[in-house]
């Protein structure tokens, strides 16, 4: 597949108005902000977008708005995962993916399938679309782990399974992926605080939460590391590390929406069951932003 997901993808938040409706004006402002500050591609409808609280009509409208406002400036990836394989396949077939360059599909959560179950799930997804597919491994959310052997099996069988977003936090597993991955298969970080060491061992980029708000510094850090300038990348890494930790201190995307409100990009409204960060974390975030 010709599409590359090297560099920095940003898992966009979904801004909400005070009445909990989608704030499309702020969504446009966010898209402009991240593109102007150097991200390589956009990721719509990921976990950071509070997708579990969006209904199907809202999901389609948010995706369409991002694609339209992006206007072809950078590639757009759409989050498309679930733990009911048959339902997910039907959902994929029902979406208009005009202007979409790939799908990000999380491993089935809660059901806890075996490796064979994970393989069969993604086989069904791959057979439902010709779009490039990025697998997403995040055991902390799914209670399951896509082992390198399973991902490699899928990548070898389906040439349009082109990458994995790896958020296991396991450096040994990261290196296993690097050694086993076929040439067309890209390895993407799913942990903003681990991007630098992951690139150092052979990863190709990141799908980032922090790139919503610390966009220029974060993309500069990733680009420096990919260019082999680890001295510069390390400097940026430690400049941002406390801020990245604060983004996740009380869950995602509460922290990043707090920062985006401080930046006048969007409000900090969240949909239940998520709630705003505490006053203490908000103060810590404000103090950190003064250091940038």
Image (spheres, rainbow, N blue to C red):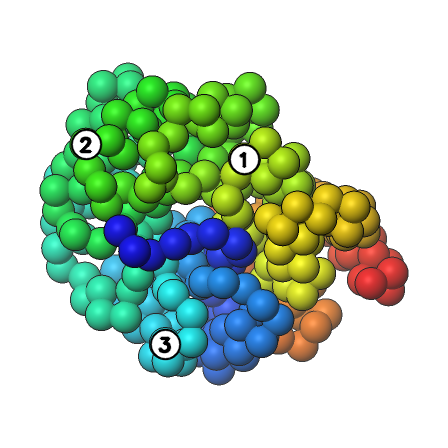
User: Which residue is denoted by mark 1 in the rendering?
Assistant: 202
Q: Residues within 10 Å of mark 3 (few under 14, many from 20)?
A: few
**Residue drawn at the location 22% of the way across and 22% of the way down:** 117
Whether residues under marks 2 and 1 lie with C-beta atoms below 8 angstroms apart, the answer is: no
Dot 3 or dot 1, earlier in sequence: 3
Q: Residues within 10 Å of mark 1 (few under 14, many from 20)?
A: some
Distance, label 3 to label 1, CA atoms, is: 29 Å
Q: Position of residue 108 (x, y in %)?
A: 31, 33
Nearest the camera: 208 or 25? 208
Label 2, secondary structure: give it. Answer: helix
Q: Position of residue 187 (x, y in %)?
A: 45, 39
Distance, label 2 to label 1, CA atoms, is: 23 Å
Dot 2 or dot 1, earlier in sequence: 2
Nearest the camera: 110 or 41? 41
Establish if 219 lies above or below 249: below
User: For residue 112, which quarter of the picture?
Assistant: top left
Q: Is residue 43 left or right of residue 230?
A: left
The numbered disc on residue 157 is 2
Q: How many marks?
A: 3
**Residue drawn at the location 70% of the way across and 72% of the way down:** 263
Q: Is residue 209 left or right of residue 286?
A: left
Q: Position of residue 96 (x, y in %)?
A: 19, 66
Label 1, secondary structure: give it. Answer: loop
Whether residues under marks 3 and 1 lie with C-beta atoms below 8 angstroms apart, the answer is: no
Q: Residues within 10 Å of mark 2 (few under 14, many from 20)?
A: few
**Residue drawn at the location 79% of the way across and 46% of the way down:** 231
Foreground label between 3 and 1: 1
- For the C terminus, the image quarter is bottom right
User: Which residue is denoted by mark 3 in the rendering?
Assistant: 72
Dot 2 or dot 3, earlier in sequence: 3
């Amino acid at each position: 597949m010709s599409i590359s997901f090297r560099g920095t993808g940003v898992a966009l938040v979904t801004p909400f108005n005070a009445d909990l409706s989608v704030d499309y004006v702020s969504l446009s402002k966010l898209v402009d902000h991240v593109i102007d500050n150097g991200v390589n591609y956009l990721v719509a409808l990921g976990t950071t977008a509070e997708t579990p609280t969006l209904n199907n009509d809202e999901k389609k409208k948010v995706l369409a708005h991002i694609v339209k406002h992006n206007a072809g400036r950078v590639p757009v990836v759409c989050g498309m995962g679930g733990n009911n394989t048959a339902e997910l396949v039907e959902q994929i077939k029902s979406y208009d993916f005009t202007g979409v360059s790939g799908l990000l599909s999380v491993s089935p959560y809660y059901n806890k399938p075996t490796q064979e179950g994970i393989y069969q799930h993604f086989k069904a997804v791959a057979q439902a679309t010709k779009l490039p597919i990025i697998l997403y491994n995040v055991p902390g959310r799914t209670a399951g782990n896509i082992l390198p052997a399973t991902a490699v099996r899928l990548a070898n069988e389906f040439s349009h399974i082109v990458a994995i977003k790896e958020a296991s936090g396991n450096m040994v597993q990261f290196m296993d992926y690097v050694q086993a991955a076929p040439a067309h298969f890209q390895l993407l970080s799913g942990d903003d605080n681990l991007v630098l060491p992951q690139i150092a061992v052979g990863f190709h980029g990141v799908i980032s939460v922090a790139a919503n708000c610390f966009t220029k510094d974060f993309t500069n850090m990733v680009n420096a590391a990919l260019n082999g300038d680890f001295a510069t990348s390390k400097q940026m890494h430690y400049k941002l590390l406390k801020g990245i930790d604060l983004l996740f201190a009380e869950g995602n995307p509460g922290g990043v929406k707090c920062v985006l409100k401080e930046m006048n990009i969007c409000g900090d409204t969240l949909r239940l069951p998520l709630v705003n960060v505490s006053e203490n974390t908000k103060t810590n975030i404000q103090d950190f932003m003064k250091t940038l």
